[in-house]
Amino acid sequence: MAEEKEKEVMPEESCEAKTPEEEKKADEAEKATEAQAQEKEPEAEVSGGEKEEKAGKKFGKGNKKDKEADKLKAQIDELNDKVVRQMAEFDNYRKRTEKEKQSMFETGAKSVIEKILPVVDNFERGLAAIPEEEAKSSFAEGMNMIYKQLMGELEKLEVKPIEAVGKEFDPNLHNAVMHVDDDSLDDNIVVEELQKGYVYRDTVVRYSMVKVAN
């Protein structure tokens, strides 16, 4: 029975045992596997390097786009600045032109008014010379109507007479051609108006010729 057991075990041992040739083949297969693994590792390293290189290229492209965007923004800001400055210059030019036009208009208007004022003076002298008994005559009433119409038109043009009698002498409005001693009046008071003065808006067209008390 012991011999039979040994016979049964022997075939198993013979199955597990390897021949020298098989061991050699196994060693060669193991070495080949290790060699393949070593060959794959550099490929992985190369693949990682390629990824880094691609990432660097992408970063370079992104950086280039940022620079182009900054350059474009700077150009836009420069153009906006030029437009703003040109608009400001044009606005100043417009204001200056309007001021010059207004000044020219006022100068021209003043010149015309200066020529009309003697006509007004003559109307006033004519009305003052009408005898009291003829004050209700058609001639006197006609002259008075024309005079009032003329003064109304001058007022619409902002031409107004300067107040003088009873006012304190103002060299900006009055021209003193005579002086009189009068203890009943304060010094520098206008006592008589010899010729009426006028202002056009804020500009004196003609100074009032006055007599002033000392």
Image (cartoon, helix red, strand yellow):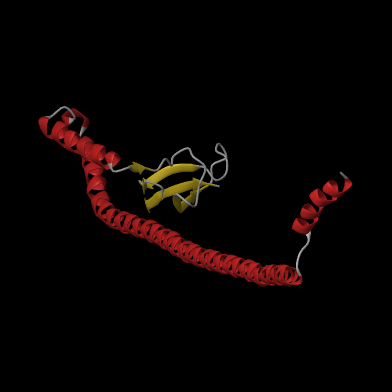
Question: Residue 103 location, x and y as percent?
Answer: 35, 57
Residue 182 location, quadrant: top right
- Say left or right for 45 vs 1: left
Relative to 151, say whether 7 is above or below: below
What residue occupies the far right of the structure in this picture? 2
What residue occupies the far left of the structure in this picture? 138
> Number of callouts in the render?
0
Question: Residue 37 location, x and y as percent?
Answer: 68, 67
Residue 25 location, quadrant: bottom right
Would residue 156 be visible to someone looking at this image? Answer: yes
Question: Residue 129 location, x and y as percent?
Answer: 22, 40
Residue sitting nearer the eye, 77 or 189:
77
Residue sitting nearer the eye, 92 or 213:
92
Question: Residue 92 location, x and y as percent?
Answer: 42, 59
Residue 160 location, quadrant: top left
Would residue 130 be visible to someone looking at this image? Answer: no
Residue sitting nearer the eye, 78 or 73:
73
Relative to 4, say whether 144 is above or below: above
Residue sitting nearer the eye, 48 or 53:
48
Q: Quadrant of the N terminus?
A: top right
Residue at left offset 11%, top offset 30%:
138
- Say left or right for 166 vs 118: right
